[in-house]
Image (cartoon, rainbow, N blue to C red):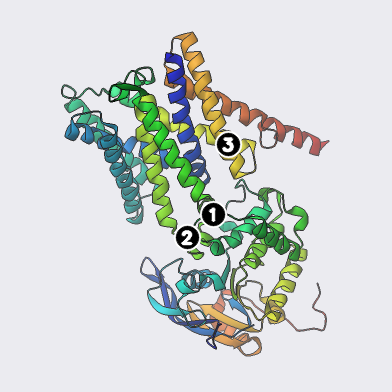
Amino acid sequence: MSGFWIILIGSLVASCCAILGCFLILRRMALIGDAISHAVLPGIAIAFLLSGSRDSLFMLLGAAVFGFAAVFLIQLLKRGGVQGDASLGVVFTALFAIGVVLISLNARNIDLDLDCVLFGEIAYAQWNTLALGGVELGPKAVWLLGFTLAVILLVVFLFYKQFKLISFDPALAAALGIPVALFHYVLMGLVSMASVSSFESVGAILVVGLLIIPPSAAYLLTDRLGVMLAISVAIGVVSAIAGYGAAAALDASIAGSMVCAAGLLFALAFLFSPKHGWLAHRLARHRAAA
Amino acid sequence: MIGAAAPLAVSGMTVAYRKKPVVQGVSFEAKKGELIGIIGPNGAGKSTLIKAILGLIPALEGEVRIYGKPYKQQRKLVGYVPQRESVDWDFPTHALDVVTMGRYGHLGLFRRPGRKEKELAFECLEKVGMAAFANRQIGQLSGGQQQRVFLARALAQDAALYLMDEPFAGVDAATEKAIVLLLDELKRQGRTVLVVHHDLTTVTEYFDSVLLLNGEKIAFGPTAAAFTPELLHRAYGGKLGFRMPVPTADSGE
């Protein structure tokens, strides 16, 4: 049973990240995902300190506040004349560091350790179960991630055309009256939510891998946005399953193995994608020369 | 019913980037069915003016009226063709899908483009001679074909007033001809079109009127009156060793 829960949790994390990651990489904002997933840490720590519990709702709120704060600060610095990538680097590392300090200061008071924050403890996530009126309802992480995935699916389903147009041609979107800034913050909010829901299982660093790698592989495999979203989720889920299998066989870090599996799938797509792969390009050039 | 108000009236428009004014006190009024070329040297604020009219960048001063009302109330009457380089042509989508985006403004918050929208988008692709490429990934189209897809998208917007940012930039002869035919058709249908344009040799041939710009308005009026060597010299200063094209019966092509 334990393998089942780990694979389910991993697949839910991967699905949340795979969908949002597509819009991030198409908007050339892959590293914003990186920034947010780190910047939410002080929010999580403060939520812990205030509530004194690992209550997911508090953590979600705290993380969301800091996710938005990070996005806002990055834009503030940019407008103030700091280089775009530098302002990103300044904001997320500084916020992350504050989170690290807060957690280390209170290490004795709260049962949240840095290793778990950085790399996740997907194997333990399943023991933290939700019980209502004495009835066991399965791991809390499954409920939290399931809820997050449902929200992401609902928002992307309802506003698919807006997200697509904003990603492709933000100027036309704005001219048509689509609130570009609002949708930007909705996307950032969803990324914050996915980061904090995932961090307990895969940690703040590896979640970035799942945000960026499966969508990047999917991008190489199709010319349609809808298909890209589906392939991205499929690659994420396959990574979760294959990663668990590899980790069990090698007795290695589960979350690490999942991201490694995603990296491997990306490498395969990069080399062998029928249209955009390295091999296809080589063959095309060879044929053109002949 | 649209009243007698002008399709586009801009008054006292001033736009600045970081306190440096790029467009200064520009006023003009476009008539129904008029083809207007916006001409001026690099950095004259041509694109900036268009973007400010559309509210994409804030104006410091000035007012825009589209058929007598602010742009925000008239979005559906205005079609926009951004510069081709402003988007990523490797985006995972195909020509028909891009044209369908022109309908998004008419669909409201939740409705998705359906068969009706796709049929209309296909007709627009046909009008620019791109029907055969409907399902082609946009990155696999030539520059001219991409520009025609953008124009088809603008047609799908079914607007009364069009703002086009350098549609002729870097296109092949076939596309240039297709765009000219399209502009004429839009004009015949009583639509008003403003085109940011670079090629001075084709101005008299393509446009009824010219807005000559160099930060401020140098001239605005019928091409014969506004597109003169003296005014061009004022707009371009010494930057241009420009000769007026000699109008001939068949100007090449």
Secondary element at image label 3: helix
Residue holding disc 2: A178
Residue B77 in the image, given as x and y percentages of width and height:
56, 73
**Label whose residue precedes the other's in the sequence (3 or 2):** 2
Relative to B229, is A15 on the left or the right? left
Q: Are marks 3 and 2 on the same chain?
A: yes
Above/below status of A144 relative to B168:
above
Residue A202 as seen in the image, left or right of residue B88:
left
For the residue marked with disc 1, what is the amino acid?
Leu
Placement of A70 over or under B162, stated as above or below:
above
Circles 1 and 2, Cβ within 8 Å, touching? The answer is: yes
The answer, for residue A203, to whether it is visible in the render is: no
Badges 1 and 2, same chain: yes
User: Mark 3 sits on what residue?
Assistant: A230
- Note whether residue A19 is visible: yes
Give, as a three-letter code, the residue at label 3: Ala
Q: Secondary structure at mark 2?
A: loop
* Residue at numbered disc 1: A165
Please name the residue shown 75% across and 32% down the image: A283
**CA separation in Å, label 3 and label 2:** 25 Å
The disc placed on residue B145 is none
Q: Position of residue A65 (x, y in %)?
A: 28, 44
